[in-house]
Image (cartoon, grey):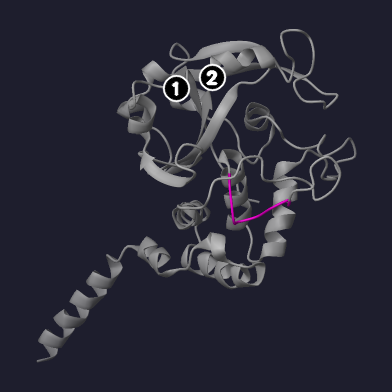
Amino acid sequence: MYIKIFFLFLTLVIGCSKTDPFEWIETLPNPWDLTENQLNIYLPQFHDRFPDYKNRLIALNLWRVGTPYGIFCLGEERGVDPDPIIRIDTSDCTVHVLTTIAYAESQSFKDAKDAMIQLHYKPNRYGQIDPSFQSRWHYTSDRLLNNPKTPDITSKVVSSDILETIEIEINRKQNGEQFLDLDWTSKESISFIPIIKIDEDILKKLPKICGVAFVKKSYFRNGIVIAHEGYLINKKNLIHASSNEKMTVNIDFLSYLFGNGGPGFDGVMFYDFKEG
């Protein structure tokens, strides 16, 4: 009798251990419908259920699938761009990436707003951060090369002979003018993997979650390298805010790259996420 009870208990324990921890997300309300106070209830639960930072990023990404698309939807709440510093009701590609990081590092909406300021804006010469249009990390390529929170890992994934490298002055158009009126440009050497080189062998070398940024050569003439970005989950799935689908979607990465008549981009960069 005791042996049967022991094996029944063991079966239950094993069965529970195989439960997908991400299934819990399906029981939650849509995040884009929540108020700030309601969000304060759920963010601590993500920390409790997913103490590992990368798993928490995955969980928050899955929760946010379906978020309505809205381009250029963040600002400084004053000055040139009065849009909110952080929000959860809508996203474009970069907004989805950055706000998800901020929520993953926070247990309240206020904390997430503070984290977003640290993530989305450059410090001044004194190391202080004052959110402004001029101090914002406007260019993904600049952020990947120079912001320690989202470091470029492209050269760690493939050998140098696979990479394509360009020399570019970010924010400088071919006619010499600045693309954005920032009183700032940056000369950079940027390496990326050509789309035609991307395959499953490369994806196998990636961490369980990383960022992926899409290079478009036609943008180079305006001092821009990256046209789009999102999250690559489990070396297979792309979660990104899609302008075509008008929402955040979860799709097969390789199908996105090579479907619908071929790639719409010329290369990719991969990047990591650093907590804190």
Q: Are marks 1 and 2 in contact (CB under 8 Å)?
A: yes
Please state the total of marks drawn on the protein image.
2
Q: Between marks 1 and 2, how big is the CA–CA gap?
A: 8 Å
Residue shown at 51% from the left, 38% from the top: 243
* Residues packed near mark 2 inside 10 Å, few (<14), some (14 to 19) or many (20 plus): some
Residue at mark 2: 216
Which percent across, then down, holds residue 206? 42, 35
Which percent across, then down, holds residue 238? 42, 40
Instruction: Residue 166: say if magenta.
Output: no
Residue at mark 1: 264
Q: Nearer the viewer, residue 51 or 116?
A: 116
| Residue span colored magenta | 84-91
**Disc on the earlier residue, 1 or 2:** 2
Q: Is residue 181 left or right of residue 85?
A: right
Residue type at mark 2: give it: Lys
The quadrant the N terminus occupies is bottom left
